[in-house]
């Protein structure tokens, strides 16, 4: 429950940052499409798959933003 509350707070902060002109990127749901284990503990440390999924999400954002900047 505590983690869910923290993620909800993070999502609210993303909205506030956008409203103030800062372009944040919300990665809180990057593991929602996998049923594979991505955490190595009950908190916040991820395994190799978790790191790979996070890296791919970040790379996708960079590519998307770069392409948008060219338009």
Image (tube, grey):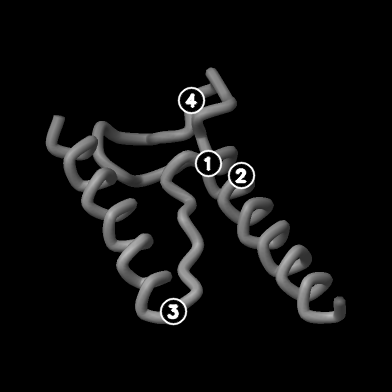
The x, y position of residue 63, in whole percent, is 77, 66
* Disc 1: which residue: 30
The x, y position of residue 40, in whole percent, is 37, 35
User: Is there a contact, CB below 8 Å, between mark 4 and mark 2?
Assistant: no
* Disc 3: which residue: 22
Dot 3 or dot 1: first in sequence order is 3
Q: How many marks?
A: 4
Closest to the camera, between mark 1 and mark 4, is 1
User: Is there a contact, CB below 8 Å, between mark 4 and mark 3?
Assistant: no
Instruction: Quote the CA–CA distance across marks 1 and 2.
Output: 7 Å
Closest to the camera, between mark 2 and mark 3, is 3
Pointer 2 local density, CA inside 10 Å: few below 14, some 14–19, many at least 20: some
Instruction: Quote the CA–CA distance across marks 3 and 1.
Output: 21 Å
Pointer 4 local density, CA inside 10 Å: few below 14, some 14–19, many at least 20: few
Query: Measured along the vertical axis of the image, is residue 19 above or below residue 33?
Result: below
Q: Which mark is residue 53?
A: 2
Q: Residue at x 28, y 45 (%)?
A: 7
Dot 4 or dot 2: first in sequence order is 4
Closest to the camera, between mark 1 and mark 2, is 1
Closest to the camera, between mark 3 and mark 1, is 3
* Disc 4: which residue: 37
Q: Secondary structure at mark 2?
A: helix
Dot 1 or dot 4: first in sequence order is 1
Q: Nearer the viewer, residue 24 or 42?
A: 24
- Screen quadrant of the C terminus: bottom right
Instruction: Quote the CA–CA distance across marks 4 and 3.
Output: 33 Å
Q: Nearer the viewer, residue 5 or 51?
A: 5
Q: Residue at x 50, y 29 (%)?
A: 32
């Amino acid at each position: 429950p505590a983690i869910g509350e923290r993620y909800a707070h993070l999502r609210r902060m993303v909205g506030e940052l956008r409203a103030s002109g800062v372009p944040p990127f919300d990665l809180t749901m990057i593991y929602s499409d996998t049923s594979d284990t991505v955490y190595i503990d009950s908190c916040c440390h991820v395994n190799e798959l978790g790191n790979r999924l996070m890296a791919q999400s970040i790379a996708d954002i960079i590519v998307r933003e770069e392409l948008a900047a060219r338009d």
